[in-house]
Image: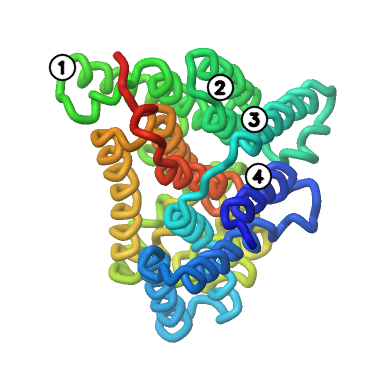
Amino acid sequence: MLSINRLYFVIFLLMLLAGMYFNHVVTAFSFVDELLSWLLVGVALLVAVAKNLYSRFKQLWVLLVISGFYLFYSITVTQYNTTTAAISDLIVELKPYVAFFVTLAIAPQFTPKQKTWLRYISMALLLLMLMLFLIPGDFWEIVYFHPAYLGINSIILSMIYYYCSEGSKRDKIITIMMLSMGFCGARSKFYGFFVVALFMLFIFKREMLSRVKIKYIIGGIFIILLMLLVAWHKINYYFIAGGEFSTDEISDSMARAALYVYTPEILADHPFFGTGFASYGTYFSAHPYSSLYGLYEMDKIWGLSEAKPDFVADTYYPVMVQFGYVGVLLFIIFVRSVFKRIKRLSKSFELSDKNIHIATLCMIFVLIENIASAVFTQGGGIVAIMLCAIALGDVVKQKELEYAN
């Protein structure tokens, strides 16, 4: 008899290895994250049909219906790209949401043996990353493609280790040591996440979610200010001085900032349902090239032009242009619902402190990475969102949930 838990574990492990860690090394792995994400839809159908649990996956069905509407809208109304490109973009953009809703509905449980294997694999992959980084030359780029992935890999692997551990003080220290390897990537996003991770693992208390105290407010303000301080350079560039760029600034950051600068204008012109799939800020909006860029003269910007579209899919939030203010609202509802679930399960003691840490940190990782990366729709972001859903669905025995100050 097929074990859904065992099948899910295999999918999760393949997503970690082929969809995330070695995705840039082996060409054959390029579409593994898409295949595995949509394989989860097959798993959902299998569970729904075999056990007559269609209602458990209602969020997934709603997602697919909304996506079907947006696809129809993209093909018949806006038409900024081809039908093939729109369908391909739908497959990519839905990956993290499909992974989250299916995982949450299945609520998979890893066995102690599986968790032990994941701990060893996480530590081995981080050690490999450090060894490759220390080798003279740029050999590590063959494996990790970009310095940002050093931080992303460190975050994901350390979170997996922590989830598969007992959550003791020793485990937290090991987790932070593993996470520290992300400093090799020297990225502001990672610095901000590291500050939040330190807070969640060593300062956060469950009662902070239900009791409003001056010390908690002051502590929260301090953490936010510290996070803004370490990431200020990028925040200032994208959101404050974003319009102050020229074609002389030949960098990926310039193209990324341009996507943000044009976002309000395009949203104002397409307020309700946006510009449609494969039209803006995604890989398939440049393969083939979306006519939307020419309408706003963005095709003249280095990194976003038809001849050089390398940085078109270099961030996530501008992609909301494709879905309009309705899409923005749906994204906010999704994020809010995750944090509301964390708070509700925390107050009712249905989640351990460790699972609260994991679910919260995975969502914060996604929200931070979305600012200057498209990792949310790539292997790393999908593993993070799967781990978040696993933590939320991993309800343990009441006696293991006793909260101690």
Height in image: 134 above or below 117? above
Amino acid type at image mark 4: Leu
Amino acid type at image mark 2: Thr
**Disc ID at residue 118:** none
Element type at mark 4: helix
Amino acid type at image mark 1: Ile
Q: Mark 3 vs mark 4: give the one in front.
A: 3
**Disc ID at residue 175:** 2
Using a 10 Å C-alpha cutoff, classify the residue at mark 2 as few (fewer than 14 neighbours), some (14 to 19) or many (20 or more): many
Q: Which residue position is annotated with label 3?
A: 119
- Name the residue rendered at 52%, 32% in the picture: 163
* 3D distance between C-alphas at marks 2 and 3: 11 Å
Q: Mark 1 vs mark 3: give the one in front.
A: 3
Element type at mark 2: helix
Height in image: 125 above or below 24? above
Using a 10 Å C-alpha cutoff, classify the residue at mark 3 as few (fewer than 14 neighbours), some (14 to 19) or many (20 or more): many
Q: Is residue 255 visible?
A: no
Q: Residue furthest front?
A: 1
Using a 10 Å C-alpha cutoff, classify the residue at mark 1 as few (fewer than 14 neighbours), some (14 to 19) or many (20 or more): few
Determine whether, in the image, residue 266 is placed left or right of residue 378: left
* 3D distance between C-alphas at marks 1 and 3: 38 Å
Callout 2 touching callout 3 (CB < 8 Å): no
